Image (cartoon, coloured by chain):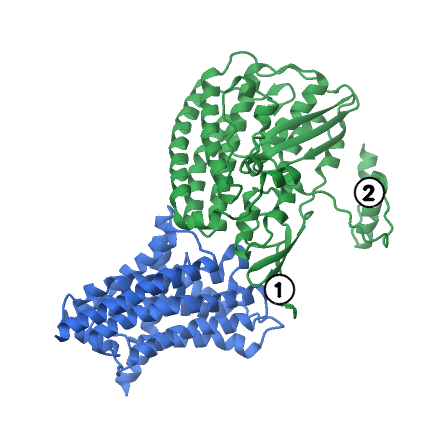
Amino acid sequence: MVKELFQLFVFPGVLFLFVFGLSAEFIDRKLCARLQNRVGPPWFQPLADFIKLLAKEEVVPEEADVSVFKLMPVLALSASITAFLYIPLSAQSAIYSFNGDVIVVLYLLTMPTLAYFLGGWYSRSVYAMIGAVRSLNQLFAYEVPFFLAILASALLANTWSLSGMAAFYSAHPGYWLFNLLGFAVALLSLLGKLEKVPFDIPEAETEIVAGVFTEYGARFLAFLRMSMNVEMAVGSSLLAAVFLPFGLRLGLAGGFILYLVKVFFIIALISLARTAVARLRLDQMINLCWKFLAPLAFAQVLLNLIIKGVIAR
Amino acid sequence: MHDSGEVHIPIGPQHPSLKEPESFLITLRGEKITAVNIKIGYNHRGIEKACEERTYIQDMYLIERICGICSHSHSTCFVQAVEEIAGLQVPPRALYIRTLVAELERVHSHLLWLGVAGHEVGFDTLLMYAWRDREVVMNLLASLTGNRVNYAINTIGGVRRDVSANTLEEAASAADILEERTKYYIGIVTTETTLINRLSGVGKLSPQDALRLGAVGPTARASGIARDVRADDPYAAYAELKFKVVTDNSCDVYGRTVVRLKELLESISLIRQVIKNLPDGPIAVKAPRRIPAGEAVSRYEAPRGEDLHYVRANATDKPDRVKFRPPTLANVQAVAHMLQDRYLADLPIVVAAIDPCFSCTDRLLSLDRGGQIEKTVLTWEQLRQSSIEHYQREGIDFSALNKKLADKM
């Protein structure tokens, strides 16, 4: 019982994820700043922002649906935290796992976007509503290649469990190299999920202020931002577990350090992508996802099916 | 939200994509813009009227503050008109120094624009880089004139400060840095796929429409219309310098970007020519305090396009009437046309592509409501009286203080 509570609330649960999410935000912001020739924030800036937002006065728009408006940030945060419990970090198995948990994780990672949509829609501000519609539109574009890329990797491992995949790839070292195409597709889709440039269309500052987040302030905004950070940490962990499953037998300390290196490498790739390009338009983004990312993900599925056939023989 | 599926969204008067207050009321169907209602006037400061109350010398500094970016443009344009009325022969060295500051101003304005354009399409790295490199020219302007903005280099009859050989050397090395950076940006804009996707085909303005709507400056030149006051009606030292009028035939935001970047190279070449050919001699002639009666129109190619000033003098030390037609006022008509059937995402960059300066543009607006409201015109005295009464009603009364002041005098 004590062990379970510790796992849920301290490690690798809520507390660890808070720290992890804040570090992910810091690394993203600092790296982005250095790439843009800026100084960037000090290490405690994300925490300071979080505390400051908690202390601010709460304002709920008069027209907004109060309960939905207040519920959505919490829902978004808890969904992304829950997803983390099924992802194997340093060892070959996660705290909880069952056959099919990869679907659950993908589903839980979709929840925050739906929560942003509902929160934005029910805050009844034009900017938030347009942002909400855009984030849903975008969801339909990046979700298919994202799912396909991850499922392709699962297909090769012949299991629907993330822990099972970790076990398969450590039993067959080098097999993860087959999935590099899927990794690229999943990374680009993750940019869409995290609403980062070039896919930050739902919160395009110069068009719709802050999109879904326009009407949010105080602790609601703090939770929304935290859920974004946790989503970034969890999304990167998922990618690390699915596409970079090597060195899982290094023991507790070594494995954990390697895991952090993998995740921060993925976050660095995200920062690099968002400093190197301009924001796309919604129609261009959807075109890109359906015309390039989805076929590439299909190609990965096909490749893995063929490889599987060869292995079986 | 309406039953027709149309959404009205206000961009402005306060909005993150606008650097100055202005209102664009957009009607959207999905992501497509169906109508744009542009309202100007949020930044009206009554400078034309204020000019009539001040002397020519004071006006020069006031006019310099019409705009923070093209301050030299406005003051030069005004000073040229006054010099024409007074019949002053400005010494060539002064004309060259004016040209030097004008071209440096164009460089800083175009680099600023490039950064803003990057920000509008979500390419913040371009903003950071362009503004960092803009510091080179800002620092040069500071050592040349004493100020980073509002250079105050002009005076009626010439310029106020001479340039030293040291500063010229500094300018020459700055020109080298700027040329290298400009070539780098031309490389980025012409090769970066996401940027090209966001810029080309957006905000189309055909040459016919550009002429019909009276577009000026880079906006017109990107539609293939070779219009440049520096070449058409040379002022300052431009008649003696060699440069190309850059045009582009793509008629869209991409073309406007390319035109501005290529103009940067032309400006850098002009700066080098000025440094090389700077004549010796005095930097100003003495100007009379009272300008003889007469009127003049002066044209000037500001970074955003043709600036036009009209001055009427009445043989006193204050102008009788001053009228400005800044470039944005000419270009803003084209914006609504460019936005037709575009996406919401294109709005910020299309508006930014004319390099709007709303503080230049804003005029007093009179709403025509079908004659329901009676219009009255107040004289200066009546206006003053009504404002005194307004504040007295608010409980603020300066009449005792005014009386005390009058007694002392």
Chain A: colour as depicted: blue
In this figure, which residue is indicated by the disc labeled 2?
A: B384
Chain letter behind tag 2: B
Question: Residue B321 vs residue A112: left or right?
Answer: right
Dot label at residue B7: 1
**Contact (Cβ within 8 Å) of mark 2 with mark 1:** no
Front in this rendered view, residue B356 or A45: B356
Q: Position of residue B202 (x, y in %)?
A: 52, 48
N-term mark: 2 or 1:
1
Label 1's element?
strand
Q: Which chain is green?
A: B
Q: Amino acid at mark 2?
A: Arg
What residue occupies the far bottom of the structure in this picture? A1
Q: For residue A26, which quarter of the picture?
A: bottom left
Residue drawn at (56%, 64%), measured in percent from left and top? B30
Label 2's element?
helix
Q: Counting other residues with Cα less than 10 Å from the Cα at mark 1, is it few (<14), some (14-19), or many (20 or more)?
A: some
Chain letter behind tag 1: B
On the question of residue A19 being in view, the answer is no
Question: Residue A178 vs residue A186: left or right?
Answer: left
Q: Quadrant of the C terminus of chain B?
A: top right
Front in this rendered view, residue B400 or A229: A229
Q: Which mark is nearer the camera, 2 or 1? A: 1
Q: Amino acid at mark 1?
A: Val
On the question of residue B344 being in view, the answer is yes
Residue drawn at (58%, 54%), measured in percent from left and top? B341
